[in-house]
Amino acid sequence: MNQQLTSRHWIAAAAPKAAPAIATSTVLILARIWNANGAEHSVGDAVLMTALSLGAAVAGALASVGHAGDGVIAGTAFATSGALALAGVAGYADGLSLPLLLWALSTAAAYGLAARHWRTDRREAAAHDRHIGERREEYAHVERVEAMRAGAQIEVAREGAAYATALAQAITARSALPGFNSAELTRAGLPELPIIEITKEH
Protein backbone atom coordinates (compact mmCIF):
# COMPACT_ATOMS: atom_id res chain seq x y z
CA MET A 1 0.00 0.00 0.00
CA ASN A 2 2.79 2.41 0.93
CA GLN A 3 4.68 1.53 -2.26
CA GLN A 4 1.61 2.39 -4.36
CA LEU A 5 1.21 5.74 -2.60
CA THR A 6 4.92 6.48 -3.07
CA SER A 7 4.78 5.66 -6.79
CA ARG A 8 1.67 7.80 -7.25
CA HIS A 9 3.32 10.67 -5.40
CA TRP A 10 6.42 10.34 -7.61
CA ILE A 11 4.34 10.35 -10.78
CA ALA A 12 2.27 13.33 -9.62
CA ALA A 13 5.47 15.26 -8.81
CA ALA A 14 7.20 14.35 -12.09
CA ALA A 15 4.26 14.98 -14.44
CA PRO A 16 4.46 18.82 -14.34
CA LYS A 17 8.23 18.66 -14.88
CA ALA A 18 7.79 16.56 -18.02
CA ALA A 19 4.90 18.61 -19.45
CA PRO A 20 7.02 21.10 -21.51
CA ALA A 21 9.02 18.31 -23.17
CA ILE A 22 5.87 16.28 -23.84
CA ALA A 23 4.15 19.30 -25.40
CA THR A 24 7.02 20.21 -27.75
CA SER A 25 7.61 16.57 -28.66
CA THR A 26 3.92 16.14 -29.50
CA VAL A 27 4.02 19.20 -31.77
CA LEU A 28 7.13 17.88 -33.52
CA ILE A 29 5.63 14.42 -34.06
CA LEU A 30 2.36 15.82 -35.44
CA ALA A 31 4.25 18.21 -37.69
CA ARG A 32 6.37 15.39 -39.14
CA ILE A 33 3.20 13.36 -39.75
CA TRP A 34 1.78 16.42 -41.52
CA ASN A 35 5.04 16.67 -43.50
CA ALA A 36 4.67 13.08 -44.69
CA ASN A 37 1.11 13.77 -45.80
CA GLY A 38 1.82 16.63 -48.18
CA ALA A 39 3.04 19.63 -46.15
CA GLU A 40 6.68 19.28 -47.26
CA HIS A 41 7.68 22.31 -49.38
CA SER A 42 4.02 23.45 -49.43
CA VAL A 43 4.13 27.25 -49.59
CA GLY A 44 0.44 27.61 -48.78
CA ASP A 45 0.76 25.57 -45.59
CA ALA A 46 3.88 27.48 -44.61
CA VAL A 47 2.14 30.84 -45.12
CA LEU A 48 -0.85 29.65 -43.11
CA MET A 49 1.27 28.54 -40.16
CA THR A 50 3.32 31.75 -40.32
CA ALA A 51 0.19 33.86 -40.22
CA LEU A 52 -1.25 31.88 -37.31
CA SER A 53 2.03 32.10 -35.40
CA LEU A 54 2.27 35.86 -35.90
CA GLY A 55 -1.36 36.27 -34.88
CA ALA A 56 -0.79 34.37 -31.65
CA ALA A 57 2.33 36.42 -30.93
CA VAL A 58 0.43 39.70 -31.47
CA ALA A 59 -2.35 38.46 -29.18
CA GLY A 60 0.22 37.65 -26.50
CA ALA A 61 1.82 41.09 -26.84
CA LEU A 62 -1.56 42.80 -26.53
CA ALA A 63 -2.50 40.68 -23.51
CA SER A 64 0.70 41.64 -21.68
CA VAL A 65 0.47 45.41 -22.30
CA GLY A 66 -0.58 47.77 -19.51
CA HIS A 67 -1.31 47.34 -15.83
CA ALA A 68 -4.35 45.17 -16.55
CA GLY A 69 -2.34 42.69 -18.63
CA ASP A 70 -3.05 39.04 -17.97
CA GLY A 71 0.15 37.02 -17.67
CA VAL A 72 -1.60 33.68 -18.09
CA ILE A 73 -3.26 34.68 -21.35
CA ALA A 74 -0.06 36.26 -22.63
CA GLY A 75 1.99 33.19 -21.76
CA THR A 76 -0.54 30.90 -23.42
CA ALA A 77 -0.58 33.04 -26.57
CA PHE A 78 3.22 33.12 -26.83
CA ALA A 79 3.40 29.36 -26.25
CA THR A 80 0.83 28.84 -28.99
CA SER A 81 2.84 31.08 -31.31
CA GLY A 82 6.00 29.08 -30.68
CA ALA A 83 4.18 25.79 -31.19
CA LEU A 84 2.72 26.98 -34.50
CA ALA A 85 6.13 28.19 -35.68
CA LEU A 86 7.69 24.86 -34.76
CA ALA A 87 4.91 22.96 -36.47
CA GLY A 88 5.23 25.09 -39.61
CA VAL A 89 8.97 24.63 -39.93
CA ALA A 90 8.83 20.91 -39.07
CA GLY A 91 6.04 20.40 -41.57
CA TYR A 92 7.71 22.35 -44.38
CA ALA A 93 11.33 21.13 -43.99
CA ASP A 94 12.48 18.01 -45.80
CA GLY A 95 15.07 16.95 -43.21
CA LEU A 96 15.12 16.50 -39.43
CA SER A 97 18.07 18.74 -38.58
CA LEU A 98 16.20 22.06 -38.49
CA PRO A 99 13.04 20.67 -36.85
CA LEU A 100 15.13 18.99 -34.12
CA LEU A 101 17.08 22.20 -33.55
CA LEU A 102 13.87 24.18 -33.19
CA TRP A 103 12.43 21.48 -30.94
CA ALA A 104 15.46 21.72 -28.64
CA LEU A 105 15.24 25.53 -28.53
CA SER A 106 11.47 25.43 -27.92
CA THR A 107 11.86 22.88 -25.15
CA ALA A 108 14.58 24.93 -23.47
CA ALA A 109 12.46 28.09 -23.69
CA ALA A 110 9.41 26.24 -22.32
CA TYR A 111 11.42 24.99 -19.35
CA GLY A 112 12.79 28.48 -18.76
CA LEU A 113 9.30 29.95 -18.58
CA ALA A 114 7.95 27.05 -16.51
CA ALA A 115 10.82 27.32 -14.00
CA ARG A 116 9.78 30.86 -13.13
CA HIS A 117 6.22 29.73 -12.43
CA TRP A 118 7.48 26.76 -10.39
CA ARG A 119 9.60 29.08 -8.24
CA THR A 120 6.59 31.33 -7.67
CA ASP A 121 4.45 28.32 -6.70
CA ARG A 122 7.11 27.10 -4.29
CA ARG A 123 7.36 30.52 -2.63
CA GLU A 124 3.58 30.74 -2.27
CA ALA A 125 3.40 27.20 -0.88
CA ALA A 126 6.19 27.94 1.62
CA ALA A 127 4.48 31.17 2.72
CA HIS A 128 1.16 29.32 3.12
CA ASP A 129 2.79 26.57 5.19
CA ARG A 130 4.53 29.14 7.37
CA HIS A 131 1.24 30.99 7.93
CA ILE A 132 -0.55 27.75 8.85
CA GLY A 133 2.25 26.86 11.27
CA GLU A 134 2.03 30.26 12.97
CA ARG A 135 -1.73 29.94 13.32
CA ARG A 136 -1.37 26.46 14.81
CA GLU A 137 1.20 27.70 17.33
CA GLU A 138 -1.08 30.58 18.28
CA TYR A 139 -4.06 28.28 18.79
CA ALA A 140 -1.91 25.82 20.76
CA HIS A 141 -0.80 28.66 23.07
CA VAL A 142 -4.41 29.76 23.62
CA GLU A 143 -5.42 26.17 24.36
CA ARG A 144 -2.60 25.80 26.90
CA VAL A 145 -3.60 29.03 28.66
CA GLU A 146 -7.26 27.95 28.78
CA ALA A 147 -6.28 24.51 30.10
CA MET A 148 -4.21 26.12 32.88
CA ARG A 149 -7.09 28.46 33.75
CA ALA A 150 -9.58 25.59 33.85
CA GLY A 151 -7.19 23.55 36.01
CA ALA A 152 -6.84 26.46 38.44
CA GLN A 153 -10.63 26.86 38.66
CA ILE A 154 -11.07 23.15 39.29
CA GLU A 155 -8.44 23.26 42.03
CA VAL A 156 -10.15 26.24 43.70
CA ALA A 157 -13.49 24.41 43.48
CA ARG A 158 -11.95 21.32 45.10
CA GLU A 159 -10.44 23.40 47.89
CA GLY A 160 -13.78 25.15 48.46
CA ALA A 161 -15.64 21.83 48.54
CA ALA A 162 -13.10 20.37 50.97
CA TYR A 163 -13.34 23.48 53.18
CA ALA A 164 -17.15 23.34 53.19
CA THR A 165 -17.08 19.63 54.03
CA ALA A 166 -14.63 20.20 56.89
CA LEU A 167 -16.74 23.08 58.20
CA ALA A 168 -19.92 20.99 58.09
CA GLN A 169 -18.16 18.16 59.91
CA ALA A 170 -16.86 20.59 62.53
CA ILE A 171 -20.33 22.05 63.09
CA THR A 172 -21.83 18.58 63.32
CA ALA A 173 -19.21 17.48 65.82
CA ARG A 174 -19.62 20.68 67.82
CA SER A 175 -23.40 20.27 67.96
CA ALA A 176 -22.95 16.88 69.63
CA LEU A 177 -21.04 18.44 72.54
CA PRO A 178 -22.86 19.64 75.64
CA GLY A 179 -23.71 23.33 75.81
CA PHE A 180 -23.96 23.83 72.03
CA ASN A 181 -26.05 26.87 71.18
CA SER A 182 -27.06 27.06 67.53
CA ALA A 183 -28.52 30.57 67.99
CA GLU A 184 -25.15 31.84 69.20
CA LEU A 185 -23.44 30.28 66.18
CA THR A 186 -25.94 31.89 63.83
CA ARG A 187 -25.49 35.26 65.54
CA ALA A 188 -21.68 35.02 65.29
CA GLY A 189 -21.89 34.03 61.59
CA LEU A 190 -20.18 31.19 59.75
CA PRO A 191 -16.68 31.61 58.37
CA GLU A 192 -16.74 32.89 54.81
CA LEU A 193 -16.28 30.30 52.08
CA PRO A 194 -13.80 31.06 49.30
CA ILE A 195 -15.36 32.62 46.21
CA ILE A 196 -15.19 30.36 43.15
CA GLU A 197 -15.21 32.37 39.94
CA ILE A 198 -16.10 30.35 36.86
CA THR A 199 -15.90 32.16 33.55
CA LYS A 200 -17.73 30.94 30.49
CA GLU A 201 -15.98 31.42 27.19
CA HIS A 202 -18.16 32.51 24.29
Image: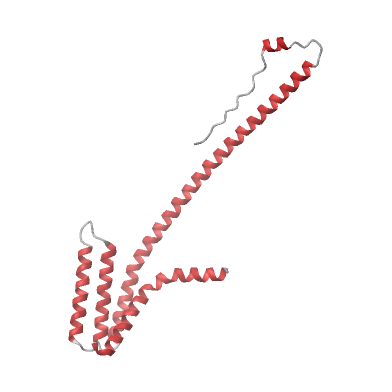
Going by the image, does 193 lie left or right of 24?
A: right
Residue 7 visible somewhere in the drawing: yes
134 versus 102 height, above or below: above
9 versus 178 height, above or below: below
Q: Where on the picture, by quarter, is residue 4?
A: bottom right
53 versus 197 height, above or below: below
Residue 94 visible somewhere in the drawing: no
**Number of labelled discs?**
0
Residue lying at 25% horizontally and 77% vertically, measured from the top left: 84
Residue 108 location, x and y as percent? 33, 74
Of residues 168 and 84, the one drawn nearer to the viewer in this rendering:
168
168 versus 23 height, above or below: above
The residue at the far front in this view is 183
Residue lying at 42% horizontally and 54% vertically, measured from the top left: 128
* Location of the N terminus (image quadrant): bottom right
Residue 125 location, x and y as percent? 42, 58
Residue lying at 74% horizontally and 18% vertically, measured from the top left: 171
Residue 179 location, x and y as percent? 79, 10
Going by the image, does 12 lie left or right of 166?
A: left
Q: Where on the picture, by quarter, is residue 83?
A: bottom left
Residue lying at 33% horizontally and 77% vertically, measured from the top left: 24
Going by the image, does 78 lie left or right of 7?
A: left
Of residues 145 and 111, the one drawn nearer to the viewer in this rendering:
145
Residue 156 location, x and y as percent? 63, 30
How was this image coloured? secondary structure
